[in-house]
């Protein structure tokens, strides 16, 4: 029977001095990474000892090869945990005949679900990690469930953060890659995803649509809608910048290209700052537009929060993508007015679109018109931003304190269901 629920106050989940493993892909500068930072902060606030296990989705990233991990570790210095571990499948894995047949060949046809899961199954870790025992394992993304199962040793409960329905994400990513035919189908990748998810004790979903979809697909499992802890952003001191913040993934690249092609020609005289490593993707996908608006691109910055501190308006011109947008949460935290497409508000309840600081515009003309109007308005003061409706919405739904309280209730219910080691 489907045990799908929202949150109610529960007795305290005593994690004081307990050992918690947070398993996650070795990624940074993305929405998933921001969610993982919130998980770590919440568990540590509950008094747990947190070990993070970063698993590479590429072969060759085994523990002990410090040089190959240097870039990742330098880019994740703010990942504060009691112990950090890294691991991945060795290169020799890829050359094994069985792996070539069962994982590499499907991958050549675009089956990213199979290859990622297969690499996780063969990941190597340090002896220190292999000897450790954990009271709770929090896994991020279905394809790392083989690692979570190993760490739980059949005794510790596993919470799985699904981070959207990944088969949909894979189909979107695959549109830009020339796979062999026949291409992997959505159904084939979804089957791998669902089979992995069945091994978890509780499935956590970060947006409304994802929660509803998985509750239907896996009615025998326990489900919970758990909004992630959105990154904090400063509400001042303010400035004159109109900003777009975007990392280099397929959905963001297509969204920025749409803005440059369809909206930018209609806003003569207005300058935009496009912040993040999306610049490399736009340069490749739309070199003509990139060249025309090159001065707008700032590139990756070490502290993206500072971008909001000196801005007066945030643009969220999203036309692709699934799942909750972390960029939208950041913008809400800043208290700034924003112009957004409906896709930027995906995964939230409908009331987000009616907030006073949110202007929804889905076609280029409407987006450009709203931008021309907003560009003439005065920059909001720090006090106005702090008291804004979007900031209140962030505090009520996506703040770290709310996330911690909700996660603690879920941990309590999971341990109380007989999963406690």
Image (cartoon, rainbow, N blue to C red):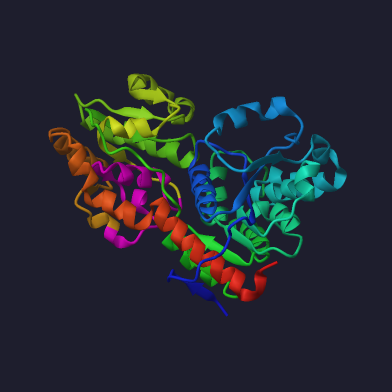
Q: Taking 279 as reference, is 161 left or right? A: right
Horizontal and vertical percent position of residue 6: 44, 69
Horizontal and vertical percent position of residue 74: 58, 28
Q: Which image quarter: residue 70? A: top right
Q: Which residues are magenta?
A: 322-351
- Which residue sits at x=60%, y=61%? 159
Q: Taking 124 as reference, is 1 left or right? A: left
- Which residue sits at x=76%, y=41%? 89
Horizontal and vertical percent position of residue 160: 59, 59
Residue 264 visible in the current orientation: yes
Q: Nearer the viewer, residue 416 or 162?
A: 416
Is 417 rendered above or below residue 106? below
Q: Nearer the viewer, residue 288 or 153?
A: 153
Name the residue furthest bottom.
1
Q: Nearer the viewer, residue 100 or 175?
A: 100
- Which residue sits at x=78%, y=41%? 126
Q: Is residue 333 magenta?
A: yes
Residue 106 visible in the current orientation: no
Horizontal and vertical percent position of residue 313: 24, 36
Report the quarter where the C terminus lies.
bottom right
Report the quarter where the N terminus lies.
bottom right
Name the residue furthest front.
17
Name the residue furthest right.
97
Q: Is residue 315 magenta?
A: no
């Amino acid at each position: 029977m489907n045990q799908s629920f929202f949150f109610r106050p529960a007795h305290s989940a005593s994690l004081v001095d307990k050992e918690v493993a947070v398993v996650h892909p070795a990624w940074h500068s993305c929405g998933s990474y921001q969610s993982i930072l919130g998980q770590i902060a919440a568990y540590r606030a509950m008094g747990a000892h947190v070990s993070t296990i970063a698993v590479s989705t590429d072969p060759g990233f085994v523990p002990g090869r410090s040089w190959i991990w240097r870039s990742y570790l330098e880019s994740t210095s703010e990942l504060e945990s009691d112990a950090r571990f890294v691991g991945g499948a060795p290169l020799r894995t890829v050359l094994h005949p069985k792996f070539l047949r069962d994982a590499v060949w499907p991958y050549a046809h675009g089956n990213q679900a199979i290859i990622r899961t297969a690499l996780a199954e063969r990941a190597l870790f340090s002896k220190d990690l292999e000897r450790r025992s954990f009271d709770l394992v929090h896994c991020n993304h279905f394809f790392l469930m083989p690692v979570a199962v190993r760490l739980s040793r059949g005794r510790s409960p596993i919470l799985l953060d699904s981070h959207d329905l990944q088969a949909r994400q894979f189909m979107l990513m695959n549109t830009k890659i020339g796979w062999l035919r026949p291409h992997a189908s959505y159904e084939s990748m979804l089957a791998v995803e669902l089979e992995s998810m069945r091994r978890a004790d509780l499935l956590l979903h970060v947006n409304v649509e994802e929660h509803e979809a998985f509750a239907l697909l896996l009615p025998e499992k326990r489900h919970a809608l758990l909004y992630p802890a959105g990154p904090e952003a400063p509400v001042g001191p303010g400035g004159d910048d109109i900003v777009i913040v975007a990392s280099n993934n397929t959905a963001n690249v297509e969204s920025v290209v749409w803005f440059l092609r369809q909206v930018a020609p209609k806003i003569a005289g207005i300058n935009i700052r496009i912040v993040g490593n999306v610049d490399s993707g736009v340069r490749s996908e739309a070199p003509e537009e990139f060249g025309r608006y090159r001065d707008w691109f700032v590139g990756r910055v070490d502290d993206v929060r500072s971008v909001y501190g000196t801005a007066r308006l945030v643009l969220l011109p999203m036309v692709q993508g699934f799942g909750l947008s972390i960029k939208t949460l950041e913008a809400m935290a800043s208290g700034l007015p924003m112009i957004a497409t409906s896709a930027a508000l995906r995964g939230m309840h409908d009331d987000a679109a009616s907030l006073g600081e949110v202007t929804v515009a889905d076609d280029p003309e409407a987006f450009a018109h709203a931008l021309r109007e907003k560009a003439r308005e005065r920059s909001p003061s720090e006090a106005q931003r702090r008291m804004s409706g979007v900031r209140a919405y962030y505090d009520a739904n996506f703040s770290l304190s709310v996330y911690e309280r909700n996660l603690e209730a879920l941990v309590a219910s999971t341990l109380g269901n007989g999963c406690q080691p």
